Image: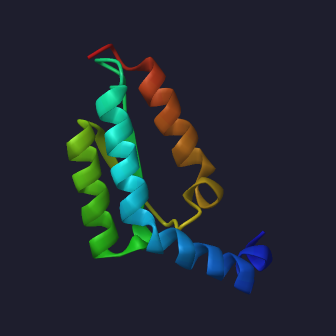
Amino acid sequence: MRRVYATTRVVDGALLENAHYRAVAAELLALRERHPLPAGLPITVLAASAGGRRWLARQRALALLLGARYQEVGPAGHLLMLDRPDAVARAVLDAVSAPAG
């Protein structure tokens, strides 16, 4: 898996994704204004610890904006779901077993 993610095609895709990040985030905010999430929906923002201080600060800000639980997961990189599937599964299980807010 990691060999595939080290190719130039993936690097090019990551650069393109980063270049459009703000536009995609703005689209998501506009979508949420038109179609808000149901009240009391459990939301968790999982942030990979290898993301760096700026990335983690952005993820904390996103969690705050969403009224979400924030959890930093490490050791983990960009592919958190591959690096730490246990943390992703635990976050899902915790969300569905949490009392309604």
**In the orientation shown, which residue stands out farthest toward the bottom?**
8
Out of 77 and 90, give the one closest to the viewer: 77
* Residue displayed at 28% across by 50% down: 62
Residue 28 screen position, x and y as percent: 39, 45
* Residue displayed at 59% across by 63% down: 79
Q: Is residue 10 left or right of residue 93?
A: right
Residue 5 screen position, x and y as percent: 71, 75
The answer to whether residue 94 is above or below residue 17 is above
The answer to whether residue 33 is above or below residue 63 is above
Q: Is residue 84 left or right of residue 64?
A: right
Q: In which quadrant will I find the N terminus? A: bottom right
The part of the image, by quadrant, that contains residue 29 is top left
Out of 40 and 37, give the one closest to the viewer: 37
- The colour scheme is rainbow
* Residue displayed at 47% across by 21% down: 96
Residue 15 screen position, x and y as percent: 54, 79
The answer to whether residue 38 is above or below residue 10 is above
- Total labels: the figure holds 0
The answer to whether residue 10 of the structure is visible from this angle is: yes
Residue 98 screen position, x and y as percent: 37, 20
Q: Is residue 72 left or right of residue 4?
A: left
The answer to whether residue 47 of the structure is visible from this angle is: no
Out of 54 and 28, give the one closest to the viewer: 28
The part of the image, by quadrant, that contains residue 36 is top left
Q: In which quadrant will I find the C terminus? A: top left
The answer to whether residue 67 is above or below residue 13 is above
